[in-house]
Structure formats: C-alpha cells, structure tokens
C-alpha cells in the first residue's frame, strides 16, 4: 500500500473505527482494465467475501449489456453473479418504464439489448450513454430537435463521465456529448448513474445496509469516490484504470483512502474492520470494569 494510503487509513481509523458491512465495487478500471484483471484482484475479492463483507458491483458502463460484462469478468476468474451487478443501464430502463417514455437511444449497439421491449417510435425523450460511432452529427442533431420541439421531453444522461480507460489509452466518455446538448437546448440533463446519490443508495437497498456502513471502491475520483461520499458512504480511490495523478485534487475530493489497486483496497477494508472490532471489544471491557 502507498504511504498516502496508509496515512489516510490511519486517520480514518483513529477518527471513527466503524465496521464496513458492504462494499460497492467498480468494474472496469478497478477489478479489471479491458480484458486483464488488476493485480491480485480475484484473490482479494475472495478475502473480502470470506471476511463477511457483502459486495455489489456497480458500473456506469453503457457500451455493453450486463450479460456481456458478466461473461467478461467471470472469464477473468471473478466469482460474480448477475444479481450482484447493479448498472446504470438497469436504473435507466427502470426510469423509462416508470415514466412511460419513448426514448431516442444514443447508445452503443451492444447496449441496446438491455432496452428490448421499450417503445422508441415517435420519441418523447433522449437517452445518452456511451454511443461512440452513434455520436454522429445527424444523431446529435436529431436529439437536439426532439428536445427543442418538445419542452417536456427529458434529456436523460445514463452518466456524465468525462473519460474512460481503454487498453490503448483514455477515451472520451458520454459527458462531453451530454454537455453539448445541454448547451444547445438550455436544458439540464437528468443523470441516472454515478455520481448521483440515488444510484448508490439503490445499489445498497437489497443489502439492507446503511450508507454509513458501506464503502465505494473505484478509479474515478469524482463519480466513484465523490459521488459515494455525497451519498454517505466512505470512498476508496484506486490508482488503476482511468486514475491520473492529482485527480482527487482537481475533483475537489478527499478520499477516505487512496491505494494502489483493488487488492490494497481490500486490505484497507479488513484493517478498518479489525480496528472496529478491537475498539468494540475495548468498549465492552470498559463497560464491565
């Protein structure tokens, strides 16, 4: 673990040694980068589960279906099941169904199967994810006109990530394209995924865990760590994936801990829980004295 990570961990433990019952874990950039796992991540996840910490895997990825994402991480040796994955695509589909919207979907073709059955004729909403080749002038202009001609048509951003990590380097995320539509229409997009507080709380709902008893582990200082902290969770920033030195400062975020990788994040969580257990035992001894 880096000296910065050890320092942060010590400060957090001294201030409030509180047990962590659940961990929300980012996928790409944290457990893996592209088709390669980060060092020791599979064994670290097993250690986390063995220690009784519940895990949910949260992702803003909009360039693929949950099924394909699951196949990728399982192929890398991670024991992760479909019910444990909470995606911004899942949350977006739920929103469209609840509001009865007919979206124009600016999405990567591989993500479209997750929206099968949602009516898209005569769109009355625009949904923007990571569209890559679909971010053509014609498609952006169509989205602009839908929003321009219908003042009630919502602009829905699956997320507003600025960049993401690919095997050959950093690439533009959907955020700049969402901002272009906001600028052209004067609208403010409704964001569904990270860093929205509701996203993290929904992910914790089926675990029965309060935000103060959970931690988020991710490689994005703003969307993963800052968003989680705003929702009441602790946030661990890993220095893999899209992380660049100084990201936390430019995002105005003070991570609960900053560590080299996911394996080090698990070590921090286990140390935190050990300190919490020791503090509870000492409190018990003092009460009996």
Image: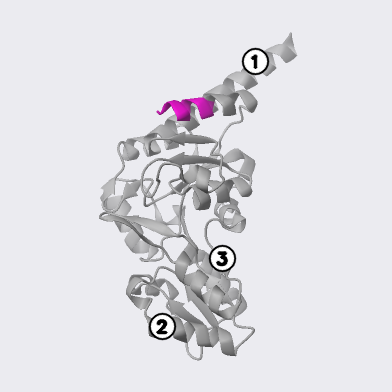
Is residue 189 at all visible to an observer of this figure?
Answer: yes
Q: Residues within 10 Å of mark 3 (few under 14, many from 20)?
A: many
Membership of 8 in magenta stretch: yes
Residue 269 lies, in percent from the top left, at 49, 32
Is residue 124 at all visible to an observer of this figure?
Answer: no
Residue placed most toward the observer, 283 or 111: 111
Residue located at (52% from left, 61% from top): 193
User: Is the residue 46 above or below the residue 14 in the image?
Assistant: below
**Quadrant where the image shows the N terminus:** top left
Instruction: Determine the image quadrant of residue 147.
Output: bottom right
User: The magenta stretch spans which residues?
Assistant: 1-9
User: Is the residue 11 above or below the residue 161 in the image?
Assistant: above
Residue of label 1: 282
Q: CA distance from mark 2 to mark 3?
A: 20 Å
Q: Which mark is residue 139?
A: 2
Residue of label 3: 191
**Quadrant where the image shows the C terminus:** top right
């Amino acid at each position: 673990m880096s000296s910065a990570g050890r320092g942060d961990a010590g400060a957090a433990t001294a201030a409030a040694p509180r047990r962590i019952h659940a961990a929300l874990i980012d996928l790409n950039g944290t457990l893996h980068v592209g088709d390669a796992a980060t060092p020791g991540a599979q064994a670290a996840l097993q250690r986390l589960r063995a220690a009784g910490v519940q895990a949910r895997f949260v992702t803003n990825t909009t360039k693929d279906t949950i099924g394909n994402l699951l196949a990728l991480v399982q192929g890398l040796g991670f024991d992760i099941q479909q019910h444990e994955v909470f995606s911004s695509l899942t949350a977006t589909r739920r929103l469209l169904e609840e509001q009865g919207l007919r979206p124009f979907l600016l999405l990567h073709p591989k993500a479209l199967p997750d929206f099968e059955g949602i009516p898209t004729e005569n769109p009355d909403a625009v949904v923007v994810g990571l569209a890559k080749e679909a971010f053509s002038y014609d498609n952006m202009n169509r989205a602009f006109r839908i929003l321009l001609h219908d003042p009630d048509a919502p602009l829905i951003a699956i997320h507003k990530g600025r960049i993401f990590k690919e095997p050959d380097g950093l690439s533009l995320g959907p955020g700049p394209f969402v901002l272009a539509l906001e600028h052209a229409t004067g609208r403010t997009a409704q964001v569904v995924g990270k860093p929205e507080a509701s996203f993290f709380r929904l992910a914790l709902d089926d675990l029965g865990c309060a935000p103060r008893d959970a931690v988020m582990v991710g490689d994005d200082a703003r969307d993963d760590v800052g968003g989680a902290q705003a929702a009441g969770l602790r946030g661990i920033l890993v220095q893999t994936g899209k992380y660049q030195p100084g990201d936390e400062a430019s995002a105005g975020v003070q991570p609960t801990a900053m560590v080299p990788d996911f394996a080090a994040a698990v070590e921090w969580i286990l140390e935190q829980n050990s300190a919490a257990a020791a503090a509870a035992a000492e409190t018990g001894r003092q009460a009996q004295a």
